[in-house]
Image: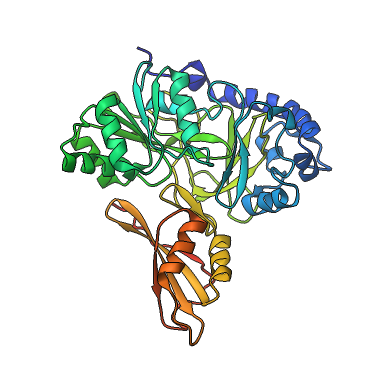
Amino acid sequence: MTPHFDALEIRDPAERERELFERLPRFLSEAVTKAEGLAEWLAGIDLSAVTDRARLARLPVLRKPELLTRQMARPPFGGFVNPDALEGARVFVSPGPIWEIEGGGADPWQAARAFFAAGVRPGARVHNALAYHLTPGGFVLDTGARALGCTVLPAGTGNTDIQVEAAAVFRPDVFAGTPDFLKLMLDRADQAGKDLSSFRIGLVSGGALFPSLREEYRRRGITVLQCYATAEFGVIAYETATADGEPLPGMVINENLIVEIVRPGTDDPVQEGEVGELVVTSLNPAYPLVRFGTGDLSAILPGQSPCGRTNMRIKGWMGRADQRTKIKGMFVDPKQIDELTKREAGIDRARLVVTRKGANDAMELHVEPVEGVALDTGAVEASLRDITKITGRVLVVARGSLPRDGKVIADERDYSD
């Protein structure tokens, strides 16, 4: 059986680069005729001249706060979606809120390659525990697995006991979801006396896969690899492995994407190996984003992967270039914390602290109350859950005790083990 999804993955890198930049000027010229917001963003630029990385780097980076502002001014997509692609399509709203559209084709998010690289083959049974509600995460992996020829159980999030019951009957080969939820299912199955030994492969996203957690899965006979995906592009990069399932360094960039690493807060690419913000240009006619800043930090690894795939590799997710933070697979934005403080009149200042509790993400909202106010922490926790869609604890602290360092979200997770 071939170790690669198709010949595109192993072509000469110069051929890939040439093909992408031959397509890009034509793509951009057509895209601006359909997407008015993109046309305004790139106004005055000679798109026919964008024929290499140096010329691409002269275009401005579009970051999420700017896209959000434009979507609010021209709802729901800010003019960055091709309206012809809306017929028969799914649309989503991710935390922020940011609106997205699912592209056309059987694998619009390009997730099939990630499944294949993880060892999944046609006929496998996939338990997909990413969210199908409002956000595109569930559909990203669902469509990729089905395009590969797998059978998918759209389990979604939550309802752990029901998911364990279903998996014990369905006998899936593959788990798809966040890195920590598989452990939650396995532990719950052990407590309930349910057999989930059918799991052999995991493809995870939406959070950090800690080395200790990966090793625990390996001891249980499950090889787990991760992919890096966003709502705007689907799978941007994915891990590959040796023949015995040992993960190889870095993540391989997906096809049909142009990835750059820029100095945070600027439009300028950094040198190979230097950490910066990951910026993506996608040749997706439904959602033509050009030099879109993901807000995620990474770095380019030198050389090619030993697996034989020839595309650029990145080190993977290395944190956030801004304070917008992914917690339990969902992004939380400083604007949401601001919304909460305005909703709860008794809060003077607030700071969301993100930590790691065992293998799971945990968040705690530290709040300074207005002088003389006794805060109802239960009500604040309910508001936090309502706004972020994530459960967190609220801790009332003394007035003046929160650091005055400009941070609204403090990510204090330790990724070293």
Quadrant containing the N terminus in the rendered view: top left
Relative side of 244 to 319, left or right? left
Q: Estimate the x, y position of residue 47 in percent, counting from the top left.
A: 78, 34
Q: Is residue 246 visible?
A: no
Q: Position of residue 63 (x, y in %)?
A: 64, 50
Total labels: the figure holds 0
Q: Residue furthest top?
A: 1
Residue sitting nearer the eye, 403 or 129: 129
Farthest bottom residue in view: 372
Q: Please state which of residues 271 and 401 is positioned toward the viewer in this rendering.
A: 401
Q: How is the image coloured?
A: rainbow
159 or 292, which lies in front?
159
Q: Looking at the picture, how far across and down is residue 258, in whole percent?
A: 60, 34
Is residue 108 something one can see in this rendering? yes
Q: Residue at the location (52% across, 58% down)?
A: 387
Left or right, 231 with respect to 2, comes to right
Locate residue 171: give its quadrant: top left
Q: Residue at x 55, y 75 (%)?
A: 345
Q: Residue furthest right?
A: 44
> Image quarter for residue 102?
top right
Q: Residue at x 49, y 57 (%)?
A: 386
Q: Would residue 57 appear left or right of 310 to someone viewing this image?
A: right
Camera-side residue of 395 and 204: 395
What residue lies at 69% left-to-right and 24% top-to-bottom?
22
Q: Position of residue 305 (x, y in %)?
A: 41, 30
- Answer above or below: position of 18 versus 364: above
